């Protein structure tokens, strides 16, 4: 099958969060299953030319830049859309002309595949940035034979980011007036990219079965629950995987000491290294980690409220994250008060994230909502036990440890409150105090299969279904 995978970020080129992990790993997994896959990305400043090479000349080293962008990573062709005026900026998103930037991206992708005469069987779009691709295919381009019969799958990674812009955006996008109605692109008076993806794609997916249910409710539907419930026959939930080549404690180049499920005793060396690295005392107390965008979605309000109680306990904590200013300021205040127990790093730092996954005992994710969440899966792979709120993909991937049966991979809480969070942390600490029991949870967590293989196969099934639906409609 020929698959075009459209995303606004992907590892190893540009990343702000989990979408990049998925867009870096799923296309590779699809290619391993024998599909022909092309990935498209904007050519951001961060992308660098993929054919960059460090070249040694005598004593000196130079960074040489190849003229062509990388065309192939592990069987996946990468097509960069280059438009320096729009994409060569310090950040990926957050500009007043974001609508133009991604309208151009969507239009350019469609123009280039025709130019290259590369007709995919299915186009897999992701999040609001690529939401207009299904719209163009089903409307302005539907009489062009090149585009006929190309199926579309639209994946929602986070319903809260909808790409809603003023109504005039319709004209910039070059779309006809009649599309600006409540059952199409109009959303509370605005023009919505995400609604375009939801209404016009052949199949909609989201990144966990639980989230697929949650987004049809008023509570977590972010205003789109109506449109989603209306199309629920076409809505599927497929849980994400993680890239087992990137996230592997046995080979992780960032870790000072490698380990796996048979050499778990070595993990403590990574803890000592991390403690030293971040400036915490080299003590044998539970070390709790958190790596996350600083966004209200991630539950920082209840965590902040729980901190005074939390730091009465004999624990250490390290948080790595960037994002909302307000959350950053509040965390900084706490880090000042509890400086011998709590270290905060406000930046994006790949290396430190690996050290935290490898070196901590417990990983915290008190999310208000979580479409899937990758951090809890990464931690489990590193034998770092997740304490998470029972919501979305967290509920689908973490199972409460039961000391009586020895089953389970972590600790969960339901109510969104500091009290419930504290209670779950305390349950984890009790088990941590029993070295044998803790080892059992670690082994359970590390043995869970979070590789992409199974989920990639589910996507292939969804693509087939989308192709069938699309072909029926064309006839
Ligand atoms: P989301 O996509 O909502 O941000 P996920 O759990 O799906 O949440 O994915 C987050 C990804 O981003 C993980 O790979 C995590 O390690 C990474 N990440 C988040 N913040 C940082 C940071 N400050 N530095 C390095 N990596 C980060
Ligand atoms: C989003 C979600 C996160 C999910 C990621 C990848 O950013 O917030 O839960 O894991 O996308 O699908």
Image (cartoon, rainbow, N blue to C red):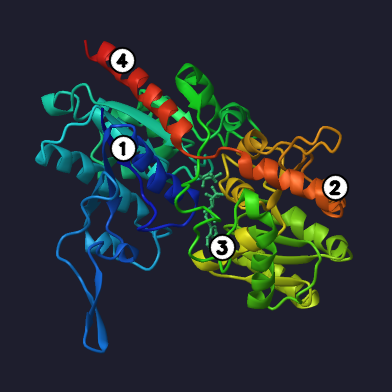
Residue for point 66% across, 51% down: 383
The answer to whether residue 143 is above or below residue 4 is above
Is the CB–ligand 2 distance for label 1 below 8 Å?
no
**Sequence order check: which comes first, mark 2 or mark 3?**
3
Crowd around label 4: few <14 · some 14–19 · many ≥20 (10 Å): some
Real-space Cα distance between discs 4 and 1?
Answer: 21 Å
Secondary element at image label 2:
helix
The answer to whether residue 376 is above or below residue 467 is below
Q: Which residue is mark 3?
A: 353
Residue for point 70% across, 50% down: 385
Secondary element at image label 1:
helix
User: Which label sits in the foreground, 3 or 1?
Assistant: 1
Residue for point 49% across, 33% down: 206
Is the CB–ligand 1 distance for label 2 below 8 Å?
no
CB atoms at circles 2 and 4 under 8 Å apart?
Answer: no
User: Which label sits in the foreground, 3 or 4?
Assistant: 3
CB atoms at circles 1 and 2 under 8 Å apart?
Answer: no
Please tell me which residue lies in front, 265 or 196: 265
Crowd around label 3: few <14 · some 14–19 · many ≥20 (10 Å): many
Real-space Cα distance between discs 2 and 3?
Answer: 25 Å
Secondary element at image label 4:
helix
**Sequence order check: which comes first, mark 4 or mark 1?**
1
Q: Which residue is mark 4?
A: 468
Q: Which residue is mark 1?
A: 31
Picture disc at residue 427: 2
**Sequence order check: which comes first, mark 1 or mark 2?**
1
Secondary element at image label 3:
helix
Crowd around label 2: few <14 · some 14–19 · many ≥20 (10 Å): some
- 75 displayed left or right of 312: left
């Amino acid at each position: 099958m020929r698959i075009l995978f459209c995303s606004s970020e992907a590892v190893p080129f540009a990343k702000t969060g989990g979408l990049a992990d998925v867009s870096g790993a799923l296309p590779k997994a699809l290619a391993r299953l024998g599909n022909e896959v092309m990935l498209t990305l904007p050519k951001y400043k961060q992308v660098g030319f993929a054919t960059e090479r460090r070249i040694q000349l005598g004593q000196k080293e130079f960074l040489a830049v190849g003229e062509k962008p990388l065309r192939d990573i592990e069987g996946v062709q990468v097509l960069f859309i280059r438009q320096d005026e729009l994409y060569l900026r310090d950040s990926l998103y957050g500009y007043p002309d974001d609508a133009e930037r991604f309208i151009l991206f969507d239009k350019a992708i469609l123009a280039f595949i025709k130019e290259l005469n590369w007709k995919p069987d299915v186009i897999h779009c992701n999040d609001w940035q690529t939401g207009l691709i299904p719209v163009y295919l089903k409307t302005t381009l539907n009489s062009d034979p090149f585009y006929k019969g190309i199926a579309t799958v639209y994946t929602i990674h986070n319903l809260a980011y909808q790409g809603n812009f003023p109504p005039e955006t319709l004209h910039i996008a070059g779309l006809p007036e009649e599309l600006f109605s409540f059952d199409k692109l109009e959303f509370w008076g605005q023009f919505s990219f995400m609604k375009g993806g939801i209404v016009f794609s052949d199949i909609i997916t989201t990144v966990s079965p639980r989230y697929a249910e949650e987004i049809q409710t008023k509570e977590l539907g972010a205003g789109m629950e109506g449109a989603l419930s209306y199309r629920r026959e076409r809505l599927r939930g497929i849980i994400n995987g993680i890239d087992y080549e990137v996230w592997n404690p046995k080979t992780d180049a960032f870790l000072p000491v490698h380990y796996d499920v048979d050499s778990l005793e070595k993990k403590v060396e990574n803890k000592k290294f991390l403690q030293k690295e971040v400036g915490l005392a080299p003590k044998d107390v539970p070390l709790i980690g958190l790596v996350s965008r600083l966004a209200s979605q991630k539950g920082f309000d209840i965590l902040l409220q729980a901190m005074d109680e939390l730091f009465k306990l004999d624990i250490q904590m390290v948080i790595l994250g960037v994002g909302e200013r307000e959350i950053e300021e509040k965390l900084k205040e706490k880090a000042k008060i509890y400086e011998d127990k709590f270290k905060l790093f406000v930046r994006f730092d790949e290396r430190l994230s690996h050290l935290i996954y490898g070196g901590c005992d417990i990983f915290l994710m008190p999310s208000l909502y979580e479409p899937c969440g990758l951090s809890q899966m990464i931690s489990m792979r590193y034998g770092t036990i997740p304490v998470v709120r029972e919501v979305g993909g967290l509920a689908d991937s973490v199972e409460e440890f039961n000391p009586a049966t020895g089953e389970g991979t972590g600790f969960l809480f339901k109510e969104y409150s500091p009290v419930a969070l504290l209670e779950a942390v305390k349950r984890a600490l009790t088990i941590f105090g029993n070295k044998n029991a803790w080892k059992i949870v670690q082994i359970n967590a590390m043995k869970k299969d979070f590789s992409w293989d199974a989920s990639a196969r589910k996507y292939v099934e969804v693509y087939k279904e989308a192709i069938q639906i699309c072909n029926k409609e064309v006839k």
